[in-house]
Amino acid sequence: MRKLTLIPVLFLLSGCAAIVNIEAAEDANDPLCAEVSVRYPDQIGDLAQRWTNAQATTAYGDPAAVLVRCGLEPVYASTLPCVSASNIDWLVDDSNAPNFRFITFARSPAVEVIVDSENASGISALDSLAQAVSKLEPSAFCSEITN
């Protein structure tokens, strides 16, 4: 009888995508990251959410095209360009293009999004994550910073 009950379970597990390995951010255990994490969307565009092995993280697509981590050190000054998507200010690091790194500006803790632009849209990812990230109140806006 035990063999019969294990076979369906093994079959179901074999159909699941592998867990995405992501390193947790230093402050991933911040309670505000929990507020953000429970609001991560189920999908970004046509990319389904994936399980990850670290607290306050998620990923989208198979293979993963969007990686998200909460709990980074907040950024209040930077020479990186800043964009706004759905009322969230993001610093844009394109030094590893076609992988783009976005990090929230002046929100504590910070949220990082890495997008493989060959398989996902950066603006779509940021727009989709805005509701979750909006739980972190900004202390400043990019438009307030003068160079």
Image (spheres, rainbow, N blue to C red):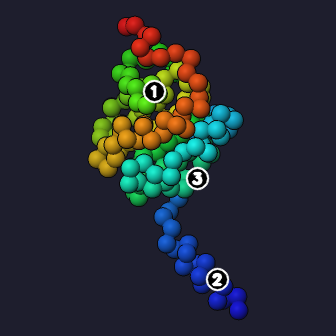
Which residue is at 49% across, 72% downward?
15
CB-based contact (under 8 Å), mark 1 and mark 3: no
The amino acid type, in three-letter code, at marker 2 is: Leu
> x, y percentage for residue 85?
40, 30
Does 31 sit left or right of 80 as displayed? right
The amino acid type, in three-letter code, at marker 1 is: Asn
Q: In the rendered image of this protein, does residue 114 appear above or below residue 145?
A: below
* Number of the front mark, 2 or 3: 2
Which residue is at 46% across, 45% downward?
67
Q: Residues within 10 Å of mark 3 (few under 14, many from 20)?
A: few
Q: Residues within 10 Å of mark 1 (few under 14, many from 20)?
A: few
In what element is the residue under mark 3? loop
Q: In the rendered image of this protein, does residue 109 appear above or below residue 122?
A: above
Residue 53: assigned label: 3
> x, y percentage for residue 9?
61, 78
Report the quarter where the N terminus lies. bottom right
> x, y percentage for residue 17?
48, 64
Q: Which residue extends farthest bottom?
A: 1
- Residue topped by disc 2: 6
The amino acid type, in three-letter code, at marker 3 is: Asn
Of the image marks 1 and 3, the number of the one nearer the N terminus: 3
Q: Residues within 10 Å of mark 2 (few under 14, many from 20)?
A: few
**Disc 1/disc 3 C-alpha distance (Å):** 30 Å
Q: Nearer the viewer, residue 96 or 67?
A: 67
Q: Which residue extends farthest top?
A: 146
- Residue topped by disc 1: 87
